Image (cartoon, rainbow, N blue to C red):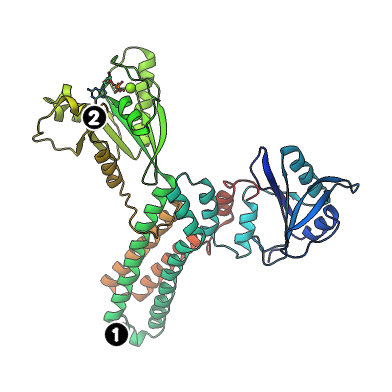
Amino acid sequence: MHIKDTIAAIATPPGKGGIGIIRVSGPLVRATAANILGHLPVERVATFSDFLDARGIAIDQGIAIFYPAPNSFTGEDILELQGHGGPVVLNLILSRVLEIGARLAHPGEFSERAYLNDKLDLAQAEAIADLIDSVTAQAARGALRSLQGEFSSRVRHITDELIDFRMFIEAAIDFPEEEVDFLQDARLIERIKLIRSDLRALSEEAAQGALLREGINIVLAGRPNAGKSSLMNRLTGKDTSIVTEIAGTTRDVIDEHIQLDGLPVKLIDTAGLQHADNPIETEGVRRALDQIGKSELVLLIVDIGVHHQDLAKHVDMLLNEFSDVSKYLVVLNKSDLWHEELIDFAHDYVFASAKTSNGLDELKDRIKSIVNYNLGGEGIFVARARHIDALRRALEALERGKLAFDQEKSGELFAEDLRATQIALGEITGEFSSDDLLGKIFSTFCIGK
Ligand SMILES: Nc1nc2c(ncn2[C@@H]2O[C@H](COP(=O)(O)OP(=O)(O)O)[C@@H](O)[C@H]2O)c(=O)[nH]1
Ligand SMILES: [Mg+2]
């Protein structure tokens, strides 16, 4: 238990609601209850009470719940005051709590205390914020699974195997006369392969989890009049982008959020890529190129009616205009105007028609497969870029160690890399963490969480 000051915050969102909740955590909780309620409520029993100001006059009335340490969210004494959900009344109650001695909580500070008091590990604490922030039902389910410890327990399982294995290697190093025999044991190789394959599988699942949490940006790019805005409107089911037969209608960047089987997607419509001679269009093209550099996928929209003859050349020309495009898919739009087969076209493409909606389902499927989104089992959990990075470093250290071991039969180098693997895994759950990292993680939470 970390003995600290007492923190308080309004835990419900700003605005008016049926109820509003104030949370207080820390050593002054009992004194706070005595002052504001006139008594300490029975543990964990919803207790109807007046909430009193310093003169003993009621500010509000509602439900108070007292959770004594260590059986509370933070592991400390907690008092929850459920008053009426108006900003003025909640601020009056909060002010009274602060007057008694608590201070205003920082963003995420309740969760941080829960983590510091071993109520949650770091990945679980992050999952709380991810659950609150999730934009699709699948992401919410994945966040809940992470919060329940699914991801952490997978990390721990690999860590345990690793610790076991390290003990074995280090024992071998301590008995040099037997080291060689020891380390050439075939079972040893089998074990390390198993750890490696577990780690790879976890990395892949975590990558899915990160996609689910972070979503992707998709840019629609191409020449003016190719049908970018029409496709955008079809895919979103809205009429956000202006569509005309006049080339150069879209000049600014317009975005809309959709989801593909739970994958959050930001669709970005851009100005047509072409040489422009007025400054507005030029700026539009610059912004389009900027978005292309930042997106996970570019849909190259081509008017097949216009470009069926110089298709390959046209696509190459478009690609040449991007300095840096990660992934792209050619969408041959206006397929309603063109019914022939394509020959010798080397790029990945789909036929589509923004006019008839033909090909849009295939387009969605291709998008999912290009970004490797395949919500296979029920067991998906959310993950963050930080976790993916830690898993990548863990895997690298493991591979490096194994290579050194295969080549030089050096148990000592191997042991060192296994230690690095374990540390990288420990960063995910927070067994190894710095104040900087904690500050960075919890400061993005909302106040009162
Ligand atoms: N026949 C046909 N016309 C289309 C299709 N998609 C767009 N258009 C027309 O092409 C013109 C340009 O479309 P727009 O979406 O503004 O193109 P953008 O400049 O790339 O955004 C408009 O007149 C649209 O109605 C399509 O699939 N089939
Ligand atoms: Mg447009």
Residue 332 x %, y %: 20, 31
Q: Is disc 2's CB within 8 Å of ligand 1?
A: yes
Q: Nearer the viewer, residue 291 or 18?
A: 18
- Answer above or below: position of 158 versus 96: below
Residue 265 x %, y %: 39, 40
At 44% from the left edge and 65% from the top edge, which residue is drawn? 155
Can residue 184 be seen? Answer: no
Determine which of the numbered discs, if any, sits on residue 353 in the image: 2
Q: Quadrant of the N terminus?
A: bottom right
Name the amino acid type tagged 1: Asp
Give the secondary structure at mark 1. helix
Quadrant containing ligand 1? top left
The tag earlier along the polypeptide, 1 or 2, is 1
Mark 2: few, some, or many residues within 10 Å (few <14, many ≥20)? many
Name the amino acid type tagged 2: Ser
Q: Is disc 1's CB within 8 Å of ligand 1?
A: no
Apparent side of residue 131 relative to residue 221 in the rendered image (left or right):
right
Q: Residue furthest bottom?
A: 177
The Cα atoms of the two marked residues, 1 and 2, are separated by 67 Å
Apparent side of residue 175 relative to residue 350 in the rendered image (left or right):
right
Q: Nearer the viewer, residue 443 or 46?
A: 46
At 41% from the left edge and 53% from the top edge, which residue is drawn? 209
Give the secondary structure at mark 2. loop
Label 1 belongs to which residue? Answer: 181
Residue 184 x %, y %: 28, 81
State which mark lies toward you, 1 or 2: 2
